[in-house]
Every structure is written in structure tokens, then in C-alpha cells.
């Protein structure tokens, strides 16, 4: 199974994603802000996928994805948001996938599985 870093400033979203992914056998590390993510990655880059919320204070997920891409160009990145209008701009982002947040985590889990096969 995969090792996944989940980043979201909303505790309930992080917990839901963590529980769902751990139930399917993945190891999940979580962070609530960009500063924490960069700190984690400075010590440990052994993640198969990094999932970032787009809307976060201080540094948003788009900026964080670009920063991660500069330092770790081979990391697989998923951007998540509750706002579907972002999807039209996805091609210009430093990410491998885009997922609209939903209580139905089927799309998110399918995206994880697809990225793991690439």
C-alpha cells in the first residue's frame, strides 16, 4: 500500500480522509498547514502521494504544490477543494490530479489508485 501525506486546515476533513485511507491499508501522515508540510518534507520525502487542500490560510494549496514541485519534482500531488470552478485551470497547476471534496470519497480513492498505477 501507499504512504500518503494529507494536508487540510479543516480537522474533520483530515480525519475523514485519514480514516478512509487507513481502512484500505494506506499509511497516512497529516498536516494542517503549508509550514508543517514543508517541515515534514524536509525530514522525510518518502510519500507516494501528497494531497493538498487548495483553500488554506498563509500559503494556499496552489502555492504549496508549486513549492513542492520545485524541491521534489517527482512527487505525485492531488489538489482538493470544495469549489468545482477551479477545475478549468488545473492544467496550469503543479499537480497530477484535482478532486472536488465530497462526503462520497469514491472519486478521491479512485484518484489515489490511478496515481499509484502511474
Image (cartoon, grey):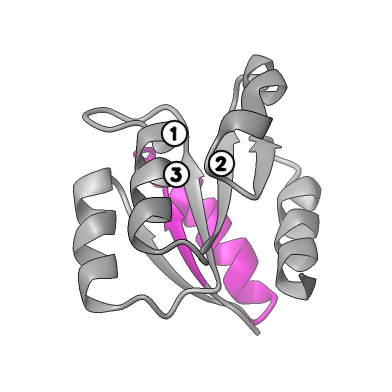
Mark in the foreground, 2 or 3: 2
Residue 79: mark: 2
Q: Are marks 2 and 3 in contact (CB under 8 Å)?
A: no
Q: Earlier in the sequence, mark 3 or mark 1?
A: 3
- Give the labeled residue for mark 1: 62
Front in this rendered view, residue 64 or 100: 64
Q: Earlier in the sequence, mark 2 or mark 1?
A: 1
Q: Are marks 3 and 1 in contact (CB under 8 Å)?
A: no
Q: Are marks 2 and 1 in contact (CB under 8 Å)?
A: yes
Q: Position of residue 48 (x, y in %)?
A: 55, 73
**Above or below: residue 98 compared with residue 118:** above
Front in this rendered view, residue 15 or 92: 92
Please give the range of residues in magenta.
Answer: 4-25
Residue 12: mark: 3
Q: Residue at x 47, y 74 (%)?
A: 47
Residue 112: mark: none
Mark 2–mark 3 distance (CA, rounded to whole Å):
17 Å
**Above or below: residue 9 compared with residue 44:** above
**Above or below: residue 98 compared with residue 112:** above
Q: Residue at x 35, y 31 (%)?
A: 60
Q: Quadrant of the C terminus?
A: bottom right
The crowding category of the residue bearing disc 2, from other C-alpha atoms within 10 Å (few below 14, some 14 to 19, many at least 20), is many
Amino acid at each position: 500500500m501507499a504512504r500518503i501525506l494529507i494536508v487540510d486546515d479543516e480537522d474533520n476533513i483530515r480525519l475523514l480522509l485519514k480514516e478512509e485511507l487507513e481502512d484500505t491499508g494506506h499509511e497516512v501522515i497529516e498536516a494542517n498547514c503549508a509550514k508543517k508540510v514543508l517541515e515534514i518534507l524536509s525530514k522525510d520525502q518518502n510519500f507516494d502521494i501528497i494531497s493538498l487542500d487548495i483553500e488554506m490560510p498563509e500559503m494556499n494549496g496552489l502555492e504549496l504544490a508549486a513549492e513542492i514541485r520545485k524541491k521534489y519534482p517527482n512527487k505525485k500531488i492531488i489538489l482538493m477543494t470544495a469549489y468545482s470552478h477551479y477545475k478549468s485551470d488545473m492544467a496550469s497547476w503543479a499537480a497530477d490530479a484535482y478532486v472536488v471534496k465530497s462526503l462520497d470519497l469514491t472519486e478521491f480513492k479512485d484518484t489515489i489508485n490511478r496515481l499509484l498505477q502511474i
